[in-house]
């Protein structure tokens, strides 16, 4: 039994937002909606699982049919990996999920080059970012297997890409006795 389960993944709050954000009739990515999706994922226990289910469903529904939807969905996925926490990373880097991404660019779906390069770039970037994290090795394993099979990954400047691990917010707060201010972790305020 797949960990993706059954049911309509678009019936959840995050699933509804993912469906809206990946609508093929949008003129471009809706970044406000993409960030709202991240907020939902980060603020609920079921958010990561519900988001991965909806992303997977959107990709499998659109593969070979509507590559605008596929690209918008890959952008939502990438945005979530960059802005969501460990519980989302564990699901997104799961070997089964990464295998689904690889199937998306297989010859059966005849994807355009831009989709192939996006998927391979995401796999390469995540494998690099998560190589030292034991519970995120699914993506590293798939990346290694693909390289062993001779798959060529697009030239990617991994140093120039936005970081996946965003630093904690810090704010300088001035209180009645603070002349220079004190630095606090924003989460503790």
Image (tube, rainbow, N blue to C red):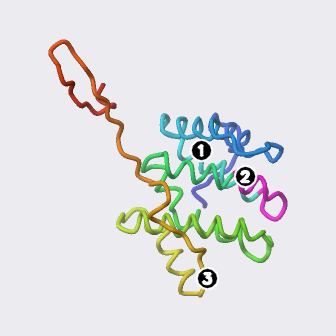
Residue 59 part of the magenta-drawn span = no
Residue range corresponding to the magenta coloring: 61-72
Q: Is mark 3 on a helix, strand or loop?
A: loop
Verify CB contact (< 8 Å) between mark 1 and mark 3.
Answer: no
Q: In this view, does 171 lie above or below 179?
A: below
Q: Is 89 situated left or right of 65 in this image?
A: left
Residue at screen point 81% across, 48% down: 24
Counting from the top left corner in percent of width and height, residue 154 is at 60, 74
Instruction: Using the image as rendered, state which of residue 142 and residue 177 is in the foreground.
Output: 177
Determine the CA span between mark 3 and mark 2. 25 Å
Which one is in front in this view, the residue at disc 3 or the one at disc 2? Answer: 3
Task: Kindly give the residue lying farthest to the left in the view shown.
Answer: 177
Counting from the top left corner in percent of width and height, residue 51 is at 60, 46
Residue at screen point 36% across, 45% down: 167
* Residue receiving disc 2: 58
Sequence order check: which comes first, mark 3 or mark 2? 2
Counting from the top left corner in percent of width and height, residue 52 is at 59, 51
Q: Is residue 171 above or below residue 113?
A: above
Determine the CA span between mark 1 and mark 2. 12 Å
Verify CB contact (< 8 Å) between mark 1 and mark 2.
Answer: no
Instruction: Using the image as rendered, state which of residue 145 and residue 69 is in the foreground.
Output: 69
């Amino acid at each position: 039994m797949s960990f993706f389960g059954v049911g309509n993944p678009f019936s959840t709050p995050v699933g509804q937002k993912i469906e809206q954000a990946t609508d093929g009739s949008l003129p471009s990515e809706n970044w406000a909606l993409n960030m709202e999706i991240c907020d939902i994922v980060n603020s609920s226990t079921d958010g990561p699982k519900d988001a991965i289910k909806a992303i997977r469903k959107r990709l499998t529904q659109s593969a070979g049919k509507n590559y605008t939807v596929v690209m918008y969905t890959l952008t939502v996925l990438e945005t979530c990996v960059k802005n969501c926490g460990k519980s989302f990373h564990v699901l997104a880097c799961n070997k089964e999920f990464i295998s689904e991404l690889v199937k998306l660019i297989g010859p059966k779906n005849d994807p355009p080059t831009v989709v192939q390069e996006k998927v391979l770039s995401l796999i390469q970037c995540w494998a690099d970012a998560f190589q030292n994290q034991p519970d995120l090795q699914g993506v590293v394993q798939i990346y290694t297997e693909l390289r062993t099979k001779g798959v060529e990954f697009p030239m990617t400047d991994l140093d120039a890409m936005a970081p996946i691990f965003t630093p904690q917010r810090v704010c300088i707060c001035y209180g009645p006795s603070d002349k220079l201010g004190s630095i606090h972790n924003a989460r503790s305020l």
